[in-house]
Image: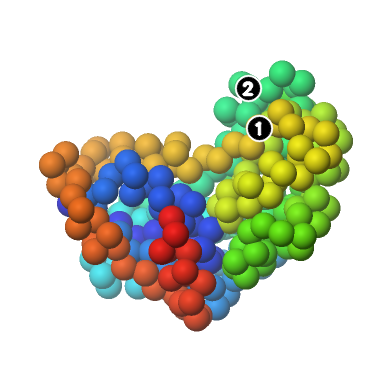
Amino acid sequence: MAVIGIMDSGVGGLSVFREIRRLMPGHHYLYYSDNAHCPYGDKSPEYIRKRLHEITGFFLGKEADAMVLACNTATAAAIEDLRACYDIPFVGMEPAVKPAALGTMSGVIGVLATAGTLKGSKYLNTKGRFSDRIRIEEKVGRGFVELVEAGKLTGPEAEATVEASLKPLLETGADRIVLGCTHYPFLLETLQKVATRLGYPDVQFIDPAPAVAARLQSVLSERGLAPASDEASADAAVATEFFASGSPATLLSFAGKI
Ligand code: DGL
């Protein structure tokens, strides 16, 4: 069994954590919501790196064996720096451009993410590898993180906010939309509802969380940290601890639902 620290600017990383726990229920998980500093999306890379050093220190104090940056924005700003500074493995997020590029029938894919992720060199490199074969359209999910942090996942306000960013992306002809921020999968029902209402019922939304969970699994086994299969136990829920830099209310309410 390994101790694994998972962080996000808020509850978004729980969309990744639920896949990780499904795949590997036998580990001890620590989840940290940095909600006192949320959203990360429009903050400077320096600011985010500083936060990530603090959070890494917190996890190391709890003897974490590995850390997951369940946040695209934090990955873009800080993962290389963290890897250079600490010995534990770091697994980060990457917008799922590849599966979208392989799956598109229209030749156009959309990427919904924060401004920080779309400016990051990691994303720009990935984009460069595919942009000679397909067209990639981007849009910041303006207000999406705030909606999720407020627990407003459905309803008129969620639909109006989602529509403002999704509609222009759908109008480009994109038939695959990459969810490039870990908060966005919590809006999937609303995204699908709005797309259908606008006349695009077949558009597919792509969440990289299962791929990230698989990546963590292989990183852990390379380090000899895979749990024995019979460790997958009913104690898994007990072995998860939740922390927040601000009020823990939203985190605990989401944690009870995933
Ligand atoms: N969930 C995060 C991400 O994946 C952070 C969003 C934010 O705090 O703006 O980018």
Looking at the image, which residue is at 44% across and 59% down?
257
- Residue 68: x and y in percent read 40, 54
N-term mark: 1 or 2? 2
- Residue 28: x and y in percent read 24, 58
Mark 2: give few (<14), some (14-19) or many (20+) Cα within 10 Å. Answer: some
Determine which of the numbered discs, if any, sits on residue 204 in the image: 1
- Residue 84: x and y in percent read 40, 55
Q: Is residue 77 found left or right of 227 in the rendered image?
A: right
In-front residue for pair 201/72? 201
In-front residue for pair 15/254? 254
Determine which of the numbered discs, if any, sits on residue 103 in the image: 2
Determine which of the numbered discs, if any, sits on residue 174 in the image: none
Q: Is residue 115 found left or right of 17 in the rendered image?
A: right
Report the amino acid beneath label 1. Gln
Looking at the image, which residue is at 83% across and 44% down?
167
* Name of the residue lying farthest toward the bottom: 247
Q: Could you tell me which secondary element the residue under label 2 belongs to?
A: helix
Q: Is residue 137 found left or right of 47 in the rendered image?
A: right
Q: Do the residues labelled 1 and 2 touch (CB within 8 Å)?
A: yes
Looking at the image, residue 49 lies above or below residue 181 = below
Q: Is residue 3 found left or right of 33 in the rendered image?
A: left
Report the amino acid beneath label 2. Gly
Looking at the image, which residue is at 86% across and 36% down?
171
Looking at the image, residue 26 lies above or below residue 176 = below
